[in-house]
Amino acid sequence: MVVDTEQARLRALAERFDVATQEADGASRHDLAAAGIRDADLVIACTSRDEVNLVAGMFARLEAPGATTVIRTSNVEYVDLWRSGQLDVDFVVCSELETANAISRIIGVPAARQTDVFAEGQVQIVEFEVQEGASRDVVDLPLRQASAPRDSKVAAIIRGAETLLPGGDDVIRPGDRIVVIGSPQAAKSWGALLSPGEAVVRDVVIFGAGRVGTAIARALVEQGIGVRVVEASRAQAVRLAEALPEARVYNATGFDPDFLERERIGKAQAAVFAMRDDAKNLYAASLAEVHGVPFTIGIAHEPVSVQAFDHAGIDVSVNPRAVTAEEIIRFAHDPRTKQIALLEGSRYEVLDVTTRDTSRYVGSKFRDMPIHGALIGAIVRNGTAIFPHGEDVLEAGDRVIVFTESADAARVVEAL
Amino acid sequence: MLLKYLGLTALFPTALALWYHEPVWPFLVAGAIASGVGLLLERMTTGAATRVGVREGFLVVSATMLLTAAFASLPYLFEGGDQLGSPIDAYLEGMSGFSTTGASVVTDYDALPRSLAMWRQFTQWLGGMGIIVLAIAVLPRLRVGGRQMMESELPGPEIAGLPERIRETARTLWTLYVALTALCAVSLASLGWLGIDDGMTEYEALAHAFSTVPTGGFSTKADSMESFSPETQWIVALFMLLGGVNFMLLYRAVVRRRPRLFVRDEEFRIYLVLALVASVALTIQIWGYGLASGEEVVLDGVFQAISVITTTGYATEDFALWPVLPLLTLFALMFVGGSAGSTTGSIKVVRHVLLGKVLRRELDQTVSPELVMPIRLNGSPVDERTLRAIAAFILLYVGFWVLGAAAIGIDSAIVGVDLGTLDVLAVSGSALGNGGPGFGITGPMASFAPLGDVSKVTMILLMWVGRLEIVPVVVLLTRSYWRL
């Protein structure tokens, strides 16, 4: 059931997806009750206005005490409020924060296109782009012989439109994208193998000091990464400079070649384009690449921009809405599913699923497990992550971190 | 009005005069005049229901300072004899006392009645009390020279009848001030009791505590601190150093037992570092020139550095006789001053710190014009207007110093007083910074008596303007101030 105040939007939604809709005000207790909130298992308040979401979350708690409530916010303060236990909802998703974390993870691992962490940070999944100069230890030879970093597993090789769930005979080639599941340490080692020469990131330039840009700057500074921020609005530049003494802030546009040259923006190891306007991000990124920035990350506010960014050669595109949606979707899954991550748009999913006693795979060795469009990258047993080898045995109650195509996700969860 | 109560303060030296069987009438008459004028002014102003706001504050502050100095000079006028009897000399001594400057025209200290000598010390102590209120409540409200930094702690637009919170703060800080003075007096007196320093009688202990804690610098002796024992000098140095600390900080850190505030406070840290560096530099110079021997090398270095940096003006050694290098060192220290919110004069450490940061930013922005760099003090950003006010203050300060030096220089040439280049500059800088002694014939062991009258009036003006941090007085000279 989707509730919105605009009839037109609801109609468009109902035409595309199989959902029930109701024209109502989410901030009205009466409207929510009329929409049948009492029977809901999960209430998601994700309007563009934080205050409406907060109020809707509170009414949901009153009207449907049993339901899980999730609210979206763009204000980090509300997240802090929730973390300190002052906000009675089950989960608060902040798109700015999620986006910032996604980007800081990508920058932390060289060559990564996308990364996500599972099991409280013990397991990291990374999608890499395999470049020409990648180490011969892992590329152009069968995986069986490759000397891959410990505690990691190649979950998929994506070659054009084709996706391989690799066995020992498969080969990684330059130009491929691969999905690796492993420990954070292993993820870093993979990054070093696949793009040698890209050392630890020390200097990142962020264009745009709006809410997203500020959150990214903060996340990077917390990681100890040196941050420079370029912001066209003087007031916003001053605000960020006052709030974040560690960042070097410029009051300039990203489109001034003289400025880019004078401040040696090209010497930065990465640049993030977090301005409000996708077109500006695209142009500024192209300009930065001309000036020699080796790694560009663009914020694509519109889903369609992701393709344009990819086409234009921006290394990574992040859509804050997609990131937020991913967080929210976690709750729509089977209760056994703790977390999911979406890769390549939403073509692939990585799921964190707890195995049932009745699963037919319980008790079997990983070596003997058939590959049916899914691959287990790691298991979490008693809170500790294990990266299984052929001889290890799956036990009931293990949480498995499994890679699969989205289309197969339901079937995979069912089997476990 | 303040004067009304100030009249009562004359009772203290009166009692002292009774004790020492010296004439009582100068103090009683002075007190009566002050109270009378105070009451009269009050009677005159109660009719007019004008609100005393920030605008009137400039005038009130400037006039009050002139009137209190006049009150302080009355006993000198009545009983000062040859040394202090002339109106200009008496007024200079009064202004020097209330502005805690410590510049004196007295030459023969033994000829002064003990009660009058104590009155000199006492005016400095009273001046210190006034300055604390000036520094924490009045000047920030008038936005003088970037003082509004402290404004967040002191809300409310009214100057007259200080709001309750400020009155409370002032009372607390006064208690601290009195306690510090008592501690200083007892420490000094116990040296006398223990026989460590025979010269330190109870009278001397109190007299010097009165001029040490407010970083004043008056002494009852012609040779300042030289005749006292090294132990005394060390203790005085310590209390001078304490007197140069922001009283608000001292209160929070010591009375409220949060000593970590000391570590966190940028101004305090730099103040200590400066005092230390100056002490070391001066010690090396004294040692290098062989100006003292043994323990005195270090003692003189430390004492003199602290004395000048806190604008106290005591001396353990007649530095007027020193060679040029240590003199220049002292000269430079004259422009440092202690912390804001203390009784010290001069530019003050925090303004130097912020100006330094502004200069650094200017250089950085020369390379990268787009760079946005908020200036921070103790981690929080400082308003750009504050920074501008500080730059303006320092420029005004330098301007007044140079003008003062010019006036004194010209007058000395006409009257025929033997002042060198450095001496003229030092007299002006010392008066403006409320330091006290100058160099040459106006050194710490000498007095300002030989100067011409124009020079003395200039000094009075400089002390007045310097103590009020220039801006309130200068504002009165602008046309826009008087526009309705």
Image (cartoon, rainbow, N blue to C red):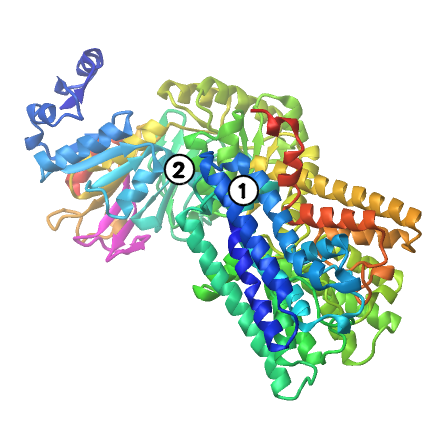
Q: Is residue A380 magenta?
A: yes
Q: Which mark is residue A15?
A: none
* Position of residue A103 in the picture relative to residue B17 (left or right): left
- How far apart in space, not on screen, are marks 1 and 2 (Cα)? 43 Å
The amino acid on which the numbered mark 1 sits, given as a three-letter code, is Gln
Query: Relative to the observer, which residue lies in front, A48 or A352?
Result: A48
Residue A198 visible to the viewer: no
Residue B321 quadrant:
bottom right
At label 1, counting other C-alpha atoms closer than 10 Å, the crowd grade (few under 14, some 14-19, many 20 or more) is many
Q: Residues within 10 Å of mark 2 (few under 14, many from 20)?
A: many
- For mark 2, give the secondary structure: helix
Q: Left or right: where does residue A403 sit relative to residue B254? A: left
Residue shown at the point (76%, 64%) measured from the top left: B81
Disc number lying in front (1 or 2): 1
Kind of residue at badge 2: Ala
Residue A265: x %, y % from top left? 61, 32
**Residue found at the very far bottom of the displayed protein:** B195
Image spot of residue B61 (x, y percent): 58, 44
> What residue is pinned by disc 1?
B148
Percent x, y of residue A309 = 46, 22
Hey, which quadrant is residue A301 in on the image? top left
Circle 2 chain: A
**Quarter of image, res A157:** top left
- Identify the residue position indicated by label 2 in the image: A102
Residue B168 in view in this figure: yes
Tell which of A282 and B217 is nearer to you. B217
Quarter placement of the C terminus of chain B: top right
> How many marks can you see?
2
Residue A156, horizontal then vertical, whole percent: 36, 37
Is B145 above or below relative to B191?
above
* Span of residues in magenta: A375-403
Residue ID at (25%, 25%) = A47
